[in-house]
Amino acid sequence: MKTLETLKIESPQEHTVLVTLNRPEVANAMNTQMGLDLLETFDGFCAAPNKQRCIVITGAGPKAFCAGGDLKQRNGMTDEQWQDQHLIFERTIRAMIDCPVPIIAAVNGAAYAGGLEISLCADFIYAAEHARFALTEVTLGIMPGASGTQNLPRAVGARRAKEIMLTGQPFSAREALEWGMVNRICGAEVLLPDVLQTAAIIAGNAPISTRQLKQSVNMGLNMDLRSGMMFEIEAYNRMVPTEDRREGIRAFNEKRKPVYVGR
């Protein structure tokens, strides 16, 4: 286990990394140091994607995933200090979005403002029954600035997203599920076990396949259909000469579980 000032980094099972936002005394609010710790962590994942096959991100404690930016730290900041801090947050969000390894968010409580934006950087979200979500920035004289105006419409549609962001009102895990932002609601006590079970399934698949698949979906969403299909075939062809492709076919014919090596 690696412990940074604001994060815990663990390996709870083979090929899976668990990243825990670890400031429970302030609802895991994101200060400058957490931004730097997350940036270091996800830059590392991007630089060495073969070292893990699935990443889970959650919050410490039973009440909050992340309450957003630490407004106590921000109180009294100059405009320059605010923008310098936000640049760190922007770089962190880009590192998360660009991470080739599949990411699951285990939202264990409130995910407000930047906390919701962090969860939206994951490939999908499982949420505890009591989890609450909101993008509250307009109530503070700002707006979402960590990909919220881009990722939320892609998750729930433009009209629902604008209602959420323009009102700043919170919504429940059940509503998030109905709107397509959350994939599964879990009891609080089984949230992390359920997420880790799904992570184990992902980690058991060929890692080149999962990374190429993720990239194909993400890139294709920003292309016309024909260009997206061409990109998909390029991603597909990357796997044809791999050891894992040959192992997958051998294992199927030998009626056994494949052992993938990431080559």
Image (tube, rainbow, N blue to C red):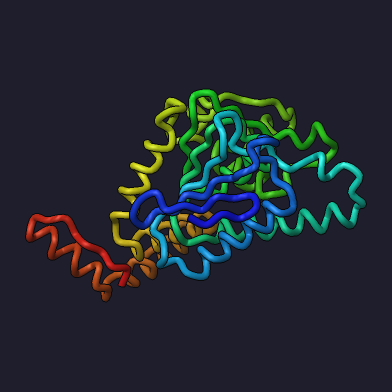
**179 in relation to 98, above or below:** above
Report which quarter residue 229 is drawn in. Answer: bottom left
Would residue 93 be seen by someone viewing this image from the given angle? no
Horizontal and vertical percent position of residue 260 = 26, 64
**245 in relation to 66, above or below:** below
Q: Residue at x 59, y 45 (%)?
A: 21
Is 114 on the left-hand or right-hand side of 206? right
Q: Report how many numbered discs are placed on residues in the image.
A: 0
Horizontal and vertical percent position of residue 104 = 46, 46
Front residue (pair 170, 12): 12
Give the farthest residue toward the left: 254
Would residue 168 be seen by someone viewing this image from the given angle? yes
Q: Residue at x 91, y 44 (%)?
A: 76
Front residue (pair 236, 134): 134
Horizontal and vertical percent position of residue 6 = 64, 50
Q: Residue at x 77, y 54 (%)?
A: 86
Where is the C terminus found, in terms of image quarters?
Answer: bottom left
Is 52 on the left-hand or right-hand side of 44? left
Horizontal and vertical percent position of residue 227 = 47, 64
**107 in relation to 83, above or below:** above
**36 in relation to 193, above or below:** below
